[in-house]
């Protein structure tokens, strides 16, 4: 049976399972399908979708308010939420957290802006609150020096946390806890205790987590990344040349991929490369046990995409500018990601050097200029779109969206949050941006 011959109700039910991108794609097929795709019922469903709202850090949907919109107003609202303007918080929703007595607390809002994690520096450990209800959903008593990362399992009430807990100043025990937020109980799924105390967690996604080891652990010259499949109890050691060059790499773990902006291997100047590695391509390299050997060098790491970053034909990666990398899921295209890279532009080739005789002559004539103050390289912001493969076994889609010069920023916030934490007199609240 042809897709277009299905009844309107069936088509609406099918479209309600899609994301905004695919609904808009169907609307461009013909006038009949376009009429169906502008139904108010469909856009009410799209704007209430948990995945859409989580990416944009939106508050819980107000169905009564949304039902007062027309179909055209709902479509316009989705457009404004997805592409801008920039968020603002004046008059937004604030939900207060219970009073937290301890001083020196780190507050972190998890992706989706529904859960707030408070880490005490004086012994209370980690506390996770459901912002929408103000309910304490999980508490873990751990040392204040513990490093942690949390992954929210899509479509479930499960959370996975990886914890690097200092053990008697000799090293760190590393655990993966699976937390059921409906009952507030956790179960330990993975544990290792051989790590150096100086490891740093970089993230957890599904069955994988990523951490870094300092140069002294394996190599005196380079920081090393270790990717762990905690369910299979296996690991692979990656080396992007971090620390061996004049600029440090940035690495992000997302579902199915590792994305890295790092200096290319070889001799200086170290130009910047963006590399996307499919986790499935690492299958021949997994190891078991506790020995951290057999590193993969930058030349050995398999990649789905590798691009030498440029702006107007000039390479990026000048050492005077800190690299910044941001990878955020797309609100309108499920499985797609927006990638931002911030880096320094190498200057144009120097003009011909004057000889000693010419410089002396210019000095006598009063035309010799003092050497200019060393300036920071001009900053560039590149934006890419990563789209999932259409069929299993195919490579991901990849394209440059925009490239522009950016004002100099020491540590740029490439993807500002649409919700923020407010703390007043020891009470925490989360403010959401207005529509």
Image: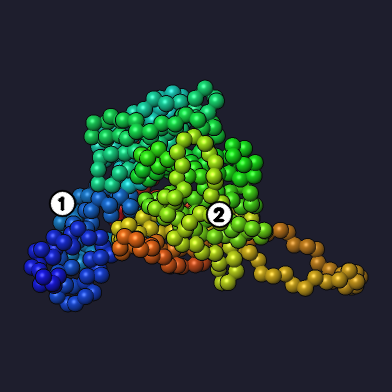
- Position of residue 129 relative to residue 72, above or below, is above
Residue 232 coordinates in the image, percent (x, y): 37, 40
Which residue is rendered at x = 50% and y = 30% of the image? 194
Answer few, some or many: residues within 10 Å of disc 1's Cα (few below 14, many 20 plus, some between 14 and 19): few
Colouring style: rainbow
Secondary structure found at label 1: helix
**Residue sticking out furthest to the bottom:** 31
Does residue 214 appear to the left or right of 361 in the view shown? left
- Determine if residue 231 is in view: yes
Does residue 166 appear to the left or right of 87 in the view shown? right
How many numbered tags mark residues here?
Answer: 2
Secondary structure found at label 2: loop
- Position of residue 103 relative to residue 312, above or below, is above
Which residue is rendered at x = 39% and y = 30% of the image? 126
Answer few, some or many: residues within 10 Å of disc 2's Cα (few below 14, many 20 plus, some between 14 and 19): some
Find disc 1 in the rendering and name its residue: 64
**Quadrant housing residue 108:** top left
Does residue 339 appear to the left or right of 136 in the view shown? right
- Position of residue 127 relative to residue 87, above or below, is above
Which residue is rendered at x = 18% and y = 65% of the image? 71
Q: Quadrant of the N terminus?
A: bottom left
**Residue sticking out furthest to the front:** 284
Please name which of the two marks, 1 or 2, marks the residue nearer to the observer. 2
- Determine if residue 422 is in view: no
Task: Tell me which numbered mark, 1 or 2, is placed earlier along the sequence.
Answer: 1
Residue 99 coordinates in the image, percent (x, y): 34, 29
Find disc 2 in the rendering and name its residue: 298
Q: Are marks 1 and 2 in contact (CB under 8 Å)?
A: no
Q: Quadrant of the C terminus?
A: bottom left
Does residue 365 appear to the left or right of 84 in the view shown? right
Residue 102 coordinates in the image, percent (x, y): 42, 26
Of the numbered discs in the image, which one, if any, rests on residue 5? none
């Amino acid at each position: 049976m042809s897709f277009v011959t299905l009844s309107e109700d069936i088509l609406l039910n099918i479209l309600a399972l899609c994301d905004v991108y695919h609904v808009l794609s169907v609307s461009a097929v013909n006038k009949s399908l376009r009429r169906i795709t502008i139904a108010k019922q469909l856009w009410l469903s799209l704007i209430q979708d948990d995945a859409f709202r989580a990416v944009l850090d939106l508050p819980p949907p107000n169905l009564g308010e949304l039902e007062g919109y027309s179909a055209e107003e709902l479509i316009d609202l989705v457009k404004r939420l997805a592409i801008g303007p920039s968020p603002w918080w004046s008059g937004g929703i604030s939900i207060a957290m219970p009073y937290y007595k301890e001083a020196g607390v780190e507050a972190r809002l998890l992706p989706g802006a529904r859960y707030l994690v408070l880490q005490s520096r004086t012994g209370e450990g980690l506390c996770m609150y459901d912002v929408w209800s103000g309910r304490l959903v999980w508490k873990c008593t751990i040392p204040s020096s513990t490093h942690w990362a949390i992954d929210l399992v899509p479509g479930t009430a499960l959370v996975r946390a990886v914890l690097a807990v200092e053990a008697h100043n000799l090293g760190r025990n590393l655990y993966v806890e699976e937390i059921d937020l409906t009952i507030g109980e956790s179960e330990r799924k993975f544990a290792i205790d051989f790590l150096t105390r100086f490891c740093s967690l970089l993230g957890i996604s599904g069955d994988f987590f990523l951490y870094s080891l300092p140069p002294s652990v394996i190599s005196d010259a380079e920081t090393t990344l270790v990717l762990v499949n905690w369910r299979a109890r296996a690991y692979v050691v990656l080396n992007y040349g971090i620390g061996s060059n004049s600029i440090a790499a940035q690495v992000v773990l997302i579902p199915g991929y590792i994305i890295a902006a790092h200096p290319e291997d070889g001799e200086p100047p170290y130009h910047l490369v963006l590399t996307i590695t499919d986790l499935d391509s690492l299958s021949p390299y997994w190891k078991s046990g506790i020995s951290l050997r057999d590193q993969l060098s930058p030349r050995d790491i398999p990649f789905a995409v590798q691009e030498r970053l440029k702006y107007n034909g000039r390479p990026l990666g000048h050492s005077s500018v800190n690299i910044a990398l941001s990878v955020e899921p797309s609100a309108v295209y499920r499985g797609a990601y927006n990638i931002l890279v911030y880096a320094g532009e190498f200057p144009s080739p120097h003009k011909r050097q004057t000889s000693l005789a010419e410089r002396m002559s210019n000095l006598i004539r009063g035309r010799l200029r003092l050497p200019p103050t060393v300036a920071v390289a001009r900053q560039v912001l590149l934006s890419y779109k990563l789209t999932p493969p259409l069929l299993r076994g195919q490579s991901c889609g990849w394209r440059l969206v925009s490239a522009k010069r950016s004002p100099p920023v020491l540590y740029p916030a490439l993807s500002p949050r649409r919700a923020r934490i407010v703390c007043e007199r020891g009470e925490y609240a989360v403010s959401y941006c207005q529509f």
